[in-house]
Amino acid sequence: MIRRVNFTGRKKIPRSRVAIRVREGGAARLFDADLRLDGLGLDGGAQVFVEAYHRSAYMRFDFGSVARLESPPIRRLDRIPVENPLFRVKVVETAGAVGRIVAAADKIVPLAVDRDEENRDTLLFAEHADLGDRVWTLDLDGDWPTLYLNTRIEGIREAARAGPEFLTLVYPEVVRAVLTRVLRGERHTDPDSDEEDWPALWLRYAMRALGRPRPPADPDDPDVGRWIEDAVNAFCGARSVLATFRKLVEERRA
């Protein structure tokens, strides 16, 4: 039994070495993990653990050792209350009373069934809950930005994925809210920081996909607000939001 854990001097496992998919498994969701730990200079006898978590909910799974990786037969996520938890991988040397973490990867986002490893970055989770009379709500206080959709609405999953109403009326505000939280709430202005950090992923999305320059280095700079609005406008232009909404209105007039 590991009683204490020492975090000193651990290596970082590249995200490209970890691929996790979550899928339906009968009464509970389960996950599959593809771990590639060769060539990292790790002790073959060190133990490997995969952990799924969402806020205070947490589950740990024993994946054998570096030299003999073995998926446990039971990988159900029955104690995780969301569809899309985050994952972490820990490589632990357990000699003596202290378990020393020698390598780790954290905030691993599970790959969608239809997403390959070349397009693995996930900016926004979608979860489903009873929201009363609300259609949707955005949670920016958890481990990852999450859009909650009301389970009372039949077909809301498809509407959120491809419907013109969500594209034109919801997602521009999601982009604004997230970028505002990144720059003014998290005070995160460096898109080149840790690749596992969702604020950095969102800033890189704004720069690479939406063509925005680097944000102001000072979160208190008055130009931060303009940078955010320009990013929202760029999102709307890239997704043809105005033309889509006009078409939606015209169809309902007919």
Image (cartoon, grey):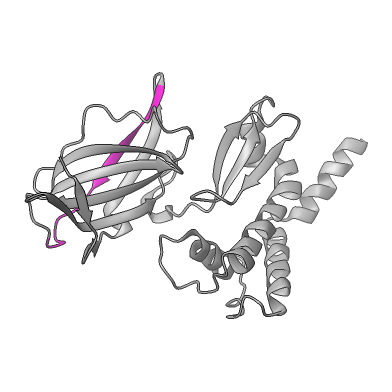
Q: Residue 161: x and y, percent?
A: 61, 40
Above or below, comparing residue 194 to residue 5 in the picture: below
User: Could you tell me which quadrant the N terminus lies in?
Assistant: top left
Report the residue that reaches farthest toward the right: 253
Instruction: Residue 176: name its quadrant.
Output: bottom right
Q: With respect to residue 107, does 164 lie above or below?
A: above
* Quadrant in the picture for residue 189: bottom right
Q: Is residue 236 left or right of residue 56?
A: right
> In the image, 73: left or right of 209?
left
How many marks the image carries: the answer is 0
Residue at the spot x=58%, y=33% of the render?
128
Residue 226, placed above or below residue 37: below
The location of residue 120, given as percent across then percent down, is: 42, 52
Residue 5 lies, in percent from the top left, at 21, 53
Q: Is residue 119 above or below residue 249?
A: below
The residue nearer to you, when weighing 12 against 245, is: 12
Q: Residue at x 56, y 65 (%)?
A: 186
For the view shown, which residue lies furthest in the top direction?
27
Q: Is residue 166 left or right of residue 106?
A: right
The residue that appears at 41% across and 48% down in the rendered structure is 109
- Pick the quarter of the image with the C terminus: top right
Out of 55 and 201, give the one closest to the viewer: 55
Instruction: Please say whether residue 93 is visible from this viewpoint.
Output: no
User: Can I make out residue 58 in this image?
Assistant: yes
Which span of residues is magenta-colored? 28-41
- On the image, the x and y values in percent for residue 138 come to 64, 46
Residue 143 painted magenta? no
Q: Horizontally, is 59 left or right of 112 in the view? A: left
